[in-house]
Amino acid sequence: MLRPRHSLLTALFVLLPVGAAPAQNLDSLLARMTLEEKLGQLNLLSAGGKASPEQTALVRRGLVGGLFNVIGTENTRAVDRVATTESRLKIPLLFGLDVIHGFRTIFPIPLAEAGAFDPELAEATARAAGREAAAAGINWTYAPMVDIARDPRWGRIAEGSGEDTYLGSLLAAARVRGFQESILATAKHFAAYGAAEGGRDYNSADISPRTLREVYLPPFKAAVDAGVATLMSAFNDIGGVPASGNAWLTDTLLRREWRFNGMVVSDWTSVAELIPHGIAGSREEAGRRALTAGVDMDMQSSIYVETLAPLVQGGRIPMAVVDEAVRRVLRAKARVAALKPVLPNPVEIRALARRAARESIVLLKNDRSLLPLDRATPVIAVIGPLADNQLDPLGPWHTDGKPEDVVTVLQGIKTRVPSGTQVLYAQGAGIEDPSTAGFAEAVAAAQRAKVAILVLGERHDMSGEAASRAYLGLPGVQQQLLEAVAATGTPIVLVLMNGRPLILEWAAEHVPAIVEDWYLGVESGNATAEVLFGEVNPSGRLAVTFPRALGQIPLYYNHRNTGRPPAADKFTSKYIDAPVTPRYPFGYGLSYTTFTYRDLRIASRTTVGSRDLQAGPVRLGPTDTLSVVVTVTNTGTREGTEVAQLYVRDEVASVARPVRELRGFRRVTLKPGEARRIELLLAARDLAFYGLDMKAVVEAGTFRVFVGPNSIEGLEATFEVAYP
Ligand code: BGC
């Protein structure tokens, strides 16, 4: 823990409850600070593992508020000691890091974990990551990334919870709670970074105020409501106003409307980037614009500390603006001091990584029940550049994760087969390498085997930051490898590792079994082999739509209906050369068993009893809750987990509403033959949208509610919202 020596600061940073540094203490500290020292608190610099001598000298002069990418307690303590004993005011530093899906123990990427539809799991993995990071001296993560992403070309889709706002909001709050047991969290990238045009990173977003409010902002609001300590302002502009210099976003909306009293940090040099954006002609103007908009900490631009003092002295930036930003930074430090990080338990965390990997795997296809495989299959071929690869399953942003901690799919398979089973391995090809020299060996292995498992996909750094793709097929010669192996006639199981939906039409048509692993982290090979051999029955669902063709993008389930919904008639909203439907819809995923839904009943919670269970429309008042009850039955022969999903549709409203919107879900584990009545609750307030006047409203009228296995199937019922 950080232990400042100075008595006033001791009171500020150690004794006070979370975030509760009293105003008078902050004010007396502010009164003692020079303008230079104030701007110093707003300065955030990246280190290369440990603070450089130059950075340490700046810390000593009180010109740095926080460092990031300093890893290891010996390194964080060394420079923090300089801050707390050698600088004039002895204010401790913030130590930031991108702890995105694990610190040392790497969990599935957030997009994969979102598919578990399990906020409790997301909270647990964030908690574990926070504990490991805190033990290495970190007190602030730049996570969770809560950007809604509807475009698989965008590499950063891997870091978030996919395309759905409701799921994304629940997971945002869960991850904030989890991290903030031991370290501060950051909801990023505020806002609409996921709407970058063309899926091209750092690009402009130009979306309507309604889409911004309804789709992109709610996960941030959920993070704020969950008590997130900080937000990060995004790189992109929204309709011409860059998010790191956007007073409406970081002041009017965030601070006044949402009452957020935490700190906003810029993204990496996003303050300086106001110049190329074209809204500032100089560094000081960029700094003025960002600071007055409400961006408190300047990450990596050094603009605040280097250029803003004369503007403050000259009255172009009110001192009150600087003081308020400094207060927010100091309050964040007070929160850090009040944290009581819990020591990580490596055995428990590893077990959690296994659970997370198991829950994240999505079974996309399984013709004639090729899976699960019999372990005693005499010869199994394991092929592909990702089959025995320890680096790539770590995915993008794997922080302190180590390839040697990763169990590969080949290793997972080998440790699970009996001694009589022969496992033949051939890499076959590289991930992007154009060489086909390894094909012959792969084909020969497949010819000798009863089944061939191909592990194909993307390199870990083909998603994440600055990793947008314009083609979404398998990179390199992997598609040819797949076809060459398939030509042997040996049944194929395709295991995919990728950070985004891929377009895999050939595989979807020709390969009998497809398993979506995403990047599962350290337990990749164990969890995959458990699924392949049926020790684990897959239960993951897609948190993002898989398109059939590049030209369909953006393709997402909760689109509007249009005036001419796709139909047989030519003059309807569709393509002449591709279907409008996705290859795999949002919420989709198979199991080794089957589930059916029956007896959907709805009732208003306020009309307790049976009245609404009888005929006639179910009426809901604007503050009521709808009870949605359905029987889910496991109609197969194995125990399995279904993710029952509840969607709504507002039939007629003053503004066109999406054809479906997720508003609830439940994981249900059922034994073979078991039936269970489950209840999902839908609050009328969850039917709100932004009306013509851009105010949130629940309009009276008829709604449809759907309950089923994914975003396109299910049972449905109708109810009405009526005002008394
Ligand atoms: C990324 C952020 C990240 C920051 C610090 C930026 O380039 O956009 O998500 O938190 O770097 O590493």
Image (spheres, rainbow, N blue to C red):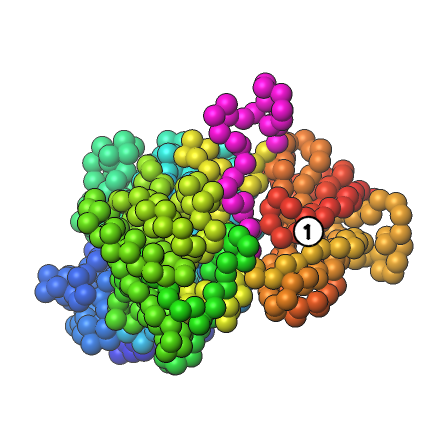
Observer-nearest of 707 and 478: 478
Image quadrant occupied by the C terminus: top right
Observer-nearest of 69 and 273: 69
Q: Is residue 510 left or right of residue 589?
A: left
Query: Residue drawn at (59%, 18%), measured in percent from left and top?
Result: 571
Occupied quadrant, residue 722: top right
Q: Amino acid at mark 1?
A: Val
Q: Is residue 566 magenta-colored?
A: yes
Occupied quadrant, residue 381: bottom left
Observer-nearest of 374 and 526: 374
> Hey, which residue is sitting farthest front in the picture?
448
Query: Residue drawn at (62%, 26%), measured in percent from left and top?
Result: 567
The percent coordinates of residue 562 (x first, y second) are 60, 27
* Secondary element at tag 1: strand
On the question of residue 332 being in view, the answer is no
Q: Is residue 672 left or right of residue 346?
A: right
Occupied quadrant, residue 149: top left
Observer-nearest of 305 and 68: 68
The residue that label 1 is drawn on is 707
The percent coordinates of residue 220 (x first, y second) are 48, 51
Q: Is residue 341 left or right of residue 699?
A: left
Image quadrant occupied by the N terminus: bottom left
Task: Please provide the residue range marked out in magenta.
Answer: 561-590
Q: Is residue 316 left or right of residue 513?
A: left
Magenta part, dominant SS:
loop
On the question of residue 502 being in view, the answer is yes
